Image (cartoon, grey):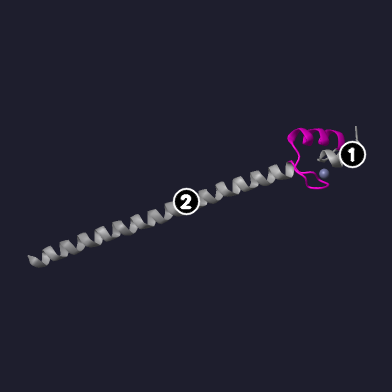
Amino acid sequence: MNNENLKQVEASIKAEELKIKNSKAKIEKYKQQKKIIELEIQLANATKSTAQQEQNTCTDCGTAVSEDVEGFSSRKYGKILCRACQNQHTKIQ
Ligand SMILES: [Zn+2]
């Protein structure tokens, strides 16, 4: 009788240990998912800021230009130039 009880208790311990193991595996999986999502967000933000920088930077001197200047320069000179550099280039139209 005591032997039976011992086996039952041992089986319960094993079952609970297995649950804990599975839970830990799930937690690790979620943590990895979280990391991947965080990295994707970081990457998206980095790409965004890089794209913005490239869009709004003078191709000659690297000075940041506003969207207005960028639009004007693209139309008139075919590339992005700041106001100072625009004077050193010939308008294409
Ligand atoms: Zn410039």
Location of the C terminus by quadrant is: top right
Vertical side of 55 occupied by 34: above or below: below
38 left or right, relative to 84: left
User: Magenta stretch: residue 41 in it?
Assistant: no
**Quarter-of-image position of residue 5:** bottom left
Q: Residue furthest right?
A: 90
Q: Residue furthest bottom?
A: 3
Few, some or many residues within 10 Å of mark 2 (<14, 14–19, 20+)? few
Q: Amino acid at mark 1?
A: Asn
Location of the N terminus by quadrant is: bottom left
Q: Which residues are magenta?
A: 56-77
**Quarter-of-image position of residue 86:** top right
Q: Residue at x 75, y 43 (%)?
A: 64
Q: Nearer the viewer, residue 55 or 13?
A: 55
Q: Position of residue 28 (x, y in %)?
A: 41, 56
Q: Position of residue 83 (x, y in %)?
A: 83, 38
Which is in the foreground here, disc 1 or disc 2?
1
Few, some or many residues within 10 Å of mark 1 (<14, 14–19, 20+)? few
Say whether mark 1 is within 8 Å of ligand 1: no
Q: Which mark is residue 33?
A: 2
2 left or right, relative to 83: left
Vertical side of 57 occupied by 67: above or below: above
User: Magenta stretch: residue 72 in it?
Assistant: yes
Q: Which residue is mark 1?
A: 87
Q: Amino acid at mark 2?
A: Gln
Say whether mark 2 is within 8 Å of ligand 1: no
Q: Position of residue 76 (x, y in %)?
A: 86, 34
Q: Residue at x 47, y 51 (%)?
A: 33
Task: Give the mark nearest the N terminus, 1 or 2.
Answer: 2
